[in-house]
Protein backbone atom coordinates (compact mmCIF):
# COMPACT_ATOMS: atom_id res chain seq x y z
CA UNK A 1 0.00 0.00 0.00
CA UNK A 2 1.00 3.60 -0.48
CA UNK A 3 1.56 5.55 2.71
CA UNK A 4 1.32 9.33 2.61
CA UNK A 5 2.23 11.86 5.25
CA UNK A 6 -0.35 11.87 8.07
CA UNK A 7 -0.40 15.70 8.22
CA UNK A 8 -4.15 16.20 8.22
CA UNK A 9 -6.59 17.59 10.80
CA UNK A 10 -7.24 15.31 13.75
CA UNK A 11 -10.98 15.28 13.09
CA UNK A 12 -10.47 14.02 9.52
CA UNK A 13 -10.61 10.31 8.83
CA UNK A 14 -7.39 8.82 7.47
CA UNK A 15 -8.31 6.74 4.44
CA UNK A 16 -6.60 3.72 2.94
CA UNK A 17 -7.54 3.95 -0.71
CA UNK A 18 -7.33 1.42 -3.53
CA UNK A 19 -8.04 2.50 -7.10
CA UNK A 20 -8.77 -0.32 -9.55
CA UNK A 21 -8.14 1.07 -13.04
CA UNK A 22 -8.30 -1.38 -15.96
CA UNK A 23 -6.40 -0.50 -19.16
CA UNK A 24 -4.40 2.25 -17.49
CA UNK A 25 -1.81 1.98 -20.28
CA UNK A 26 -2.74 1.92 -23.96
CA UNK A 27 -2.09 -1.61 -25.29
CA UNK A 28 -0.07 -0.48 -28.33
CA UNK A 29 3.26 0.80 -26.95
CA UNK A 30 4.45 2.18 -30.29
CA UNK A 31 1.32 4.25 -30.87
CA UNK A 32 2.85 7.68 -30.38
CA UNK A 33 -0.29 9.44 -31.64
CA UNK A 34 -2.05 8.12 -28.54
CA UNK A 35 0.64 7.77 -25.89
CA UNK A 36 3.02 10.44 -27.10
CA UNK A 37 0.47 13.23 -26.86
CA UNK A 38 -1.03 12.21 -23.51
CA UNK A 39 -0.51 14.60 -20.62
CA UNK A 40 -0.79 12.82 -17.25
CA UNK A 41 1.19 14.90 -14.74
CA UNK A 42 -0.70 13.64 -11.70
CA UNK A 43 -0.12 9.97 -12.38
CA UNK A 44 3.44 10.52 -13.57
CA UNK A 45 4.20 12.25 -10.26
CA UNK A 46 2.81 9.27 -8.35
CA UNK A 47 4.50 6.67 -10.54
CA UNK A 48 7.89 8.36 -10.14
CA UNK A 49 7.66 7.89 -6.37
CA UNK A 50 5.99 4.48 -6.40
CA UNK A 51 7.16 0.91 -6.41
CA UNK A 52 5.75 -1.00 -9.37
CA UNK A 53 4.88 -4.66 -9.04
CA UNK A 54 4.14 -6.61 -12.20
CA UNK A 55 2.34 -9.94 -12.16
CA UNK A 56 0.87 -12.21 -14.80
CA UNK A 57 -1.95 -10.84 -16.90
CA UNK A 58 -5.49 -11.02 -15.50
CA UNK A 59 -8.84 -10.08 -16.95
CA UNK A 60 -10.39 -7.04 -15.32
CA UNK A 61 -13.22 -9.17 -13.92
CA UNK A 62 -10.79 -11.62 -12.31
CA UNK A 63 -8.67 -8.82 -10.84
CA UNK A 64 -11.84 -7.25 -9.45
CA UNK A 65 -13.02 -10.51 -7.89
CA UNK A 66 -9.65 -11.01 -6.23
CA UNK A 67 -10.14 -7.73 -4.39
CA UNK A 68 -12.88 -9.67 -2.57
CA UNK A 69 -10.80 -12.81 -2.08
CA UNK A 70 -12.47 -14.83 -4.87
CA UNK A 71 -10.39 -16.80 -7.33
CA UNK A 72 -13.18 -18.41 -9.40
CA UNK A 73 -16.18 -16.11 -9.31
CA UNK A 74 -19.67 -16.82 -10.72
CA UNK A 75 -19.78 -13.52 -12.58
CA UNK A 76 -23.31 -13.93 -13.93
CA UNK A 77 -25.01 -14.12 -10.54
CA UNK A 78 -22.72 -11.49 -9.04
CA UNK A 79 -23.16 -8.99 -11.87
CA UNK A 80 -26.92 -9.54 -11.83
CA UNK A 81 -26.96 -8.84 -8.09
CA UNK A 82 -25.47 -5.43 -8.83
CA UNK A 83 -28.23 -4.59 -11.34
CA UNK A 84 -31.55 -2.96 -10.53
CA UNK A 85 -33.26 -6.37 -10.66
CA UNK A 86 -30.61 -7.95 -8.44
CA UNK A 87 -32.96 -9.93 -6.17
CA UNK A 88 -33.40 -12.41 -9.03
CA UNK A 89 -29.76 -13.42 -8.55
CA UNK A 90 -30.28 -14.91 -5.11
CA UNK A 91 -31.42 -18.28 -6.41
CA UNK A 92 -30.60 -20.39 -9.44
CA UNK A 93 -27.64 -20.95 -11.76
CA UNK A 94 -26.89 -17.84 -13.81
CA UNK A 95 -24.74 -16.89 -16.77
CA UNK A 96 -24.01 -13.58 -18.40
CA UNK A 97 -25.60 -13.96 -21.84
CA UNK A 98 -24.43 -10.81 -23.56
CA UNK A 99 -25.52 -10.08 -27.15
CA UNK A 100 -22.68 -10.01 -29.69
CA UNK A 101 -22.02 -9.67 -33.40
CA UNK A 102 -19.72 -12.20 -35.07
CA UNK A 103 -18.10 -11.51 -38.42
CA UNK A 104 -15.35 -13.01 -40.52
CA UNK A 105 -12.18 -10.97 -40.98
CA UNK A 106 -9.14 -12.38 -42.78
CA UNK A 107 -10.56 -15.90 -42.42
CA UNK A 108 -10.98 -15.54 -38.67
CA UNK A 109 -13.96 -14.74 -36.50
CA UNK A 110 -14.04 -11.33 -34.82
CA UNK A 111 -16.47 -10.70 -31.96
CA UNK A 112 -17.98 -7.30 -31.21
CA UNK A 113 -19.99 -6.84 -28.04
CA UNK A 114 -23.05 -4.60 -27.94
CA UNK A 115 -20.98 -1.66 -26.75
CA UNK A 116 -19.52 -1.45 -30.25
CA UNK A 117 -22.91 -1.03 -31.97
CA UNK A 118 -26.37 0.25 -31.11
CA UNK A 119 -29.02 -2.04 -29.66
CA UNK A 120 -32.14 -0.40 -28.28
CA UNK A 121 -34.20 -1.65 -25.37
CA UNK A 122 -37.14 -2.71 -27.52
CA UNK A 123 -34.89 -4.89 -29.69
CA UNK A 124 -33.26 -6.47 -26.66
CA UNK A 125 -36.53 -7.31 -24.93
CA UNK A 126 -38.13 -8.62 -28.14
CA UNK A 127 -35.19 -10.92 -28.87
CA UNK A 128 -35.09 -12.18 -25.27
CA UNK A 129 -38.82 -12.87 -25.33
CA UNK A 130 -38.45 -14.81 -28.58
CA UNK A 131 -35.56 -16.83 -27.15
CA UNK A 132 -37.59 -17.62 -24.03
CA UNK A 133 -40.54 -18.78 -26.12
CA UNK A 134 -38.32 -21.05 -28.23
CA UNK A 135 -35.75 -22.32 -25.73
CA UNK A 136 -37.68 -22.36 -22.48
CA UNK A 137 -36.57 -25.95 -21.89
CA UNK A 138 -32.99 -24.70 -21.45
CA UNK A 139 -33.54 -21.64 -19.29
CA UNK A 140 -34.94 -18.14 -19.07
CA UNK A 141 -33.39 -14.92 -20.37
CA UNK A 142 -33.48 -11.66 -18.40
CA UNK A 143 -32.55 -8.27 -19.88
CA UNK A 144 -30.99 -5.81 -17.46
CA UNK A 145 -29.93 -3.36 -20.19
CA UNK A 146 -29.75 -3.60 -23.96
CA UNK A 147 -26.09 -4.62 -23.58
CA UNK A 148 -26.25 -6.88 -20.52
CA UNK A 149 -28.39 -10.00 -20.65
CA UNK A 150 -28.57 -12.97 -18.30
CA UNK A 151 -29.60 -16.60 -18.61
CA UNK A 152 -30.98 -18.62 -15.70
CA UNK A 153 -30.44 -22.25 -16.57
CA UNK A 154 -33.00 -24.89 -15.68
CA UNK A 155 -30.12 -27.26 -15.01
CA UNK A 156 -26.60 -26.24 -14.00
CA UNK A 157 -24.00 -26.75 -16.73
CA UNK A 158 -20.23 -26.39 -16.44
CA UNK A 159 -19.29 -23.86 -19.11
CA UNK A 160 -15.90 -22.29 -18.40
CA UNK A 161 -15.10 -19.45 -20.80
CA UNK A 162 -13.26 -16.15 -20.64
CA UNK A 163 -15.01 -12.92 -19.60
CA UNK A 164 -16.34 -10.85 -22.47
CA UNK A 165 -13.76 -8.10 -21.89
CA UNK A 166 -10.97 -10.50 -22.95
CA UNK A 167 -12.75 -11.41 -26.20
CA UNK A 168 -14.50 -8.27 -27.44
CA UNK A 169 -12.88 -6.74 -30.50
CA UNK A 170 -10.43 -9.59 -30.90
CA UNK A 171 -9.98 -12.40 -33.38
CA UNK A 172 -10.82 -15.87 -32.16
CA UNK A 173 -9.41 -19.20 -33.30
CA UNK A 174 -11.31 -22.47 -33.26
CA UNK A 175 -14.56 -22.88 -31.36
CA UNK A 176 -16.20 -19.83 -29.88
CA UNK A 177 -16.25 -21.15 -26.33
CA UNK A 178 -16.50 -24.25 -24.17
CA UNK A 179 -15.81 -26.95 -26.77
CA UNK A 180 -17.11 -29.77 -24.63
CA UNK A 181 -20.04 -27.90 -23.15
CA UNK A 182 -23.62 -28.79 -23.95
CA UNK A 183 -24.27 -25.07 -24.04
CA UNK A 184 -21.91 -24.69 -26.99
CA UNK A 185 -23.93 -27.15 -29.03
CA UNK A 186 -27.13 -25.41 -27.98
CA UNK A 187 -25.59 -22.04 -28.88
CA UNK A 188 -25.39 -23.21 -32.51
CA UNK A 189 -29.19 -23.50 -32.47
CA UNK A 190 -29.49 -20.05 -30.92
CA UNK A 191 -27.31 -18.57 -33.67
CA UNK A 192 -29.49 -20.09 -36.39
CA UNK A 193 -32.59 -18.79 -34.63
CA UNK A 194 -31.17 -15.28 -34.34
CA UNK A 195 -30.04 -15.28 -37.97
CA UNK A 196 -33.63 -15.61 -39.17
CA UNK A 197 -35.31 -13.35 -36.64
CA UNK A 198 -37.20 -10.35 -38.13
CA UNK A 199 -35.31 -7.89 -35.91
CA UNK A 200 -32.00 -9.00 -37.42
CA UNK A 201 -33.45 -8.99 -40.92
CA UNK A 202 -34.51 -5.38 -40.33
CA UNK A 203 -31.10 -4.47 -38.89
CA UNK A 204 -29.34 -6.02 -41.86
CA UNK A 205 -31.57 -4.10 -44.29
CA UNK A 206 -30.62 -0.90 -42.45
CA UNK A 207 -26.92 -1.71 -42.67
CA UNK A 208 -26.57 -2.33 -38.92
CA UNK A 209 -24.59 -5.20 -37.36
CA UNK A 210 -26.92 -8.07 -36.57
CA UNK A 211 -27.13 -9.68 -33.13
CA UNK A 212 -26.15 -13.15 -34.30
CA UNK A 213 -24.84 -14.78 -31.13
CA UNK A 214 -24.52 -14.56 -27.35
CA UNK A 215 -21.42 -14.70 -25.19
CA UNK A 216 -22.25 -17.08 -22.34
CA UNK A 217 -19.82 -16.69 -19.46
CA UNK A 218 -19.46 -16.47 -15.69
CA UNK A 219 -21.75 -19.36 -14.80
CA UNK A 220 -22.71 -20.37 -11.27
CA UNK A 221 -24.92 -19.70 -8.28
CA UNK A 222 -24.58 -16.68 -6.05
CA UNK A 223 -21.97 -17.53 -3.41
CA UNK A 224 -22.01 -16.75 0.28
CA UNK A 225 -18.93 -14.54 0.54
CA UNK A 226 -16.88 -13.77 3.59
CA UNK A 227 -16.79 -10.10 4.60
CA UNK A 228 -14.16 -8.37 2.48
CA UNK A 229 -11.57 -5.90 3.72
CA UNK A 230 -13.39 -2.81 2.47
CA UNK A 231 -15.48 -0.29 4.37
CA UNK A 232 -17.21 0.70 1.13
CA UNK A 233 -16.95 0.23 -2.63
CA UNK A 234 -17.55 3.16 -4.97
CA UNK A 235 -18.48 2.14 -8.49
CA UNK A 236 -20.87 2.41 -11.41
CA UNK A 237 -19.94 -1.12 -12.50
CA UNK A 238 -22.68 -3.69 -11.74
CA UNK A 239 -20.20 -6.54 -11.19
CA UNK A 240 -18.30 -4.51 -8.60
CA UNK A 241 -21.57 -3.50 -6.96
CA UNK A 242 -22.68 -7.13 -6.87
CA UNK A 243 -19.42 -8.27 -5.29
CA UNK A 244 -19.80 -5.60 -2.62
CA UNK A 245 -23.40 -6.52 -1.87
CA UNK A 246 -22.59 -10.24 -1.74
CA UNK A 247 -19.86 -9.41 0.79
CA UNK A 248 -22.17 -7.29 2.95
CA UNK A 249 -20.37 -4.07 2.01
CA UNK A 250 -22.06 -0.81 0.97
CA UNK A 251 -21.93 -0.19 -2.78
CA UNK A 252 -21.83 3.57 -3.32
CA UNK A 253 -22.27 5.42 -6.63
CA UNK A 254 -18.98 6.53 -8.15
CA UNK A 255 -18.17 10.06 -6.94
CA UNK A 256 -17.12 12.72 -9.41
CA UNK A 257 -13.62 13.02 -7.98
CA UNK A 258 -11.32 12.32 -5.04
CA UNK A 259 -12.51 15.33 -3.05
CA UNK A 260 -16.11 14.14 -3.21
CA UNK A 261 -15.08 10.64 -2.14
CA UNK A 262 -13.21 11.95 0.89
CA UNK A 263 -16.01 14.32 1.83
CA UNK A 264 -18.51 11.48 2.12
CA UNK A 265 -16.24 8.54 2.99
CA UNK A 266 -17.64 6.24 5.66
CA UNK A 267 -14.90 4.00 6.95
CA UNK A 268 -11.18 4.03 6.37
CA UNK A 269 -10.82 1.31 3.70
CA UNK A 270 -12.14 2.47 0.36
CA UNK A 271 -12.16 0.62 -2.97
CA UNK A 272 -12.91 2.74 -6.03
CA UNK A 273 -13.45 1.11 -9.42
CA UNK A 274 -12.52 3.50 -12.24
CA UNK A 275 -13.28 1.60 -15.44
CA UNK A 276 -13.78 4.46 -17.93
CA UNK A 277 -10.61 3.46 -19.84
CA UNK A 278 -11.84 -0.07 -20.56
CA UNK A 279 -14.47 0.54 -23.29
CA UNK A 280 -12.19 2.74 -25.45
CA UNK A 281 -9.54 0.00 -25.45
CA UNK A 282 -12.07 -2.68 -26.39
CA UNK A 283 -13.38 -0.54 -29.26
CA UNK A 284 -9.96 0.81 -30.34
CA UNK A 285 -11.06 4.37 -29.62
CA UNK A 286 -7.77 6.11 -28.92
CA UNK A 287 -9.31 9.59 -28.71
CA UNK A 288 -11.92 8.38 -26.26
CA UNK A 289 -9.19 6.71 -24.19
CA UNK A 290 -7.10 9.90 -24.08
CA UNK A 291 -10.09 12.00 -23.06
CA UNK A 292 -11.03 9.54 -20.33
CA UNK A 293 -7.40 9.49 -19.15
CA UNK A 294 -7.20 13.28 -18.85
CA UNK A 295 -10.38 13.28 -16.76
CA UNK A 296 -8.98 10.50 -14.59
CA UNK A 297 -5.74 12.36 -14.03
CA UNK A 298 -7.49 15.63 -13.23
CA UNK A 299 -10.10 14.17 -10.88
CA UNK A 300 -8.19 11.39 -9.09
CA UNK A 301 -4.41 11.38 -9.53
CA UNK A 302 -3.47 15.07 -9.52
CA UNK A 303 -5.37 15.84 -6.27
CA UNK A 304 -3.20 13.30 -4.45
CA UNK A 305 -0.34 15.81 -4.55
CA UNK A 306 -2.27 18.40 -2.56
CA UNK A 307 -4.52 18.73 0.46
CA UNK A 308 -6.62 15.71 -0.49
CA UNK A 309 -3.50 13.57 -0.64
CA UNK A 310 -2.71 14.37 2.97
CA UNK A 311 -5.92 12.64 3.98
CA UNK A 312 -4.76 9.43 2.32
CA UNK A 313 -2.94 7.19 4.74
CA UNK A 314 -2.40 4.46 2.16
CA UNK A 315 -2.83 4.31 -1.62
CA UNK A 316 -2.73 1.38 -4.02
CA UNK A 317 -3.32 1.61 -7.78
CA UNK A 318 -4.19 -1.75 -9.37
CA UNK A 319 -4.24 -1.85 -13.18
CA UNK A 320 -5.14 -4.95 -15.23
CA UNK A 321 -3.51 -4.35 -18.63
CA UNK A 322 -2.18 -6.24 -21.62
CA UNK A 323 1.28 -5.83 -20.04
CA UNK A 324 0.22 -7.73 -16.91
CA UNK A 325 -1.43 -6.90 -13.62
CA UNK A 326 0.36 -3.71 -12.53
CA UNK A 327 0.29 -2.44 -8.96
CA UNK A 328 1.80 0.87 -7.88
CA UNK A 329 2.50 1.49 -4.20
CA UNK A 330 3.87 4.64 -2.58
CA UNK A 331 5.07 4.85 1.03
CA UNK A 332 5.26 7.96 3.18
CA UNK A 333 8.96 8.51 2.76
CA UNK A 334 8.61 8.21 -1.03
CA UNK A 335 6.36 11.26 -1.21
CA UNK A 336 9.29 13.50 -0.45
CA UNK A 337 11.73 12.02 -2.96
CA UNK A 338 11.77 15.14 -5.10
CA UNK A 339 14.82 13.99 -7.03
CA UNK A 340 12.85 11.26 -8.75
CA UNK A 341 12.03 12.38 -12.25
CA UNK A 342 8.58 11.99 -13.77
CA UNK A 343 8.48 9.85 -16.91
CA UNK A 344 5.92 10.03 -19.71
CA UNK A 345 3.42 7.21 -19.94
CA UNK A 346 4.79 6.43 -23.41
CA UNK A 347 8.20 5.60 -21.91
CA UNK A 348 6.62 3.32 -19.32
CA UNK A 349 4.60 1.52 -22.00
CA UNK A 350 7.72 0.90 -24.04
CA UNK A 351 9.61 -0.46 -21.03
CA UNK A 352 6.73 -2.74 -20.13
CA UNK A 353 6.53 -4.04 -23.69
CA UNK A 354 10.25 -4.79 -23.63
CA UNK A 355 9.98 -6.43 -20.22
CA UNK A 356 12.29 -3.90 -18.53
CA UNK A 357 9.93 -2.09 -16.14
CA UNK A 358 10.00 -2.99 -12.47
Image (tube, rainbow, N blue to C red):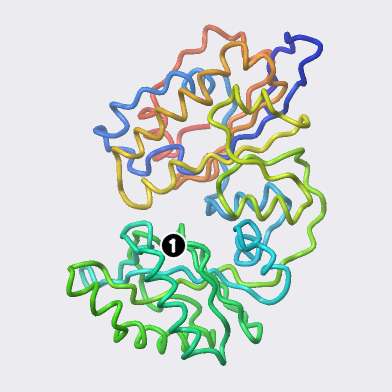
Report x, y in % for residue 305.
56, 14
Task: Work out whether 289 lies above or below 17.
Answer: below
In the image, residue 248 lies at what x, y percent?
Answer: 79, 51
**Image quadrant occupied by the N terminus:** top right
Q: Residue 261: give x, y in percent of width and height.
A: 63, 28
Against 318, residue 87 (above or below) is below
Q: Characterize the local packing of mark 1: few (<14), some (14-19) or many (20 or more) Cα atoms within 10 angstroms.
A: many
Pick the front one: 291 or 123:
123
- Left/right placement of residue 264 relative to residue 144 reads right
Callout count: 1
Q: In this view, does 146 lie above or below 29?
A: below
Q: Is mark 1 on a helix, strand or loop?
A: loop
Residue plotted at (53% across, 77% down): 141
Question: Residue at horizontal 67%, vertical 23%?
Answer: 263
Q: Is residue 138 above or below residue 96?
A: below
The residue that appears at 63% across and 39% down in the rendered structure is: 234
Q: Which of 343 and 156 is in front in this view?
A: 156
Name which quarter of the figure residue 116 lies in: bottom left
- Is 77 in front, or is 170? 77
Residue 254 horizontal/vertical position (percent): 58, 38
Per the image, the residue denoted by label 1 is: 147
Kindly identify the residue that appears in the image at 34 percent across and 34 percent down. Answer: 290
Name the residue furthest front.
Answer: 122
Amino acid sequence: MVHFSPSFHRDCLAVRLTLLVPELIWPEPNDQLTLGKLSAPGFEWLAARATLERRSRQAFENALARQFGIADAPFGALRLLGEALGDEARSGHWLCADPVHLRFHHERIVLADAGAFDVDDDEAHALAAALNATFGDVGHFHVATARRWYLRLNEAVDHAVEPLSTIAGRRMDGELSGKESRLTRWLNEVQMFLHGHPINEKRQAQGKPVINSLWLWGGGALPALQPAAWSAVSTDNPLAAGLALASGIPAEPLPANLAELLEHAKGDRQLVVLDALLPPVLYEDSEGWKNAWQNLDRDWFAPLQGTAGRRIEALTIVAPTIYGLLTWTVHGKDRWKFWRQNRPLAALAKELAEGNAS
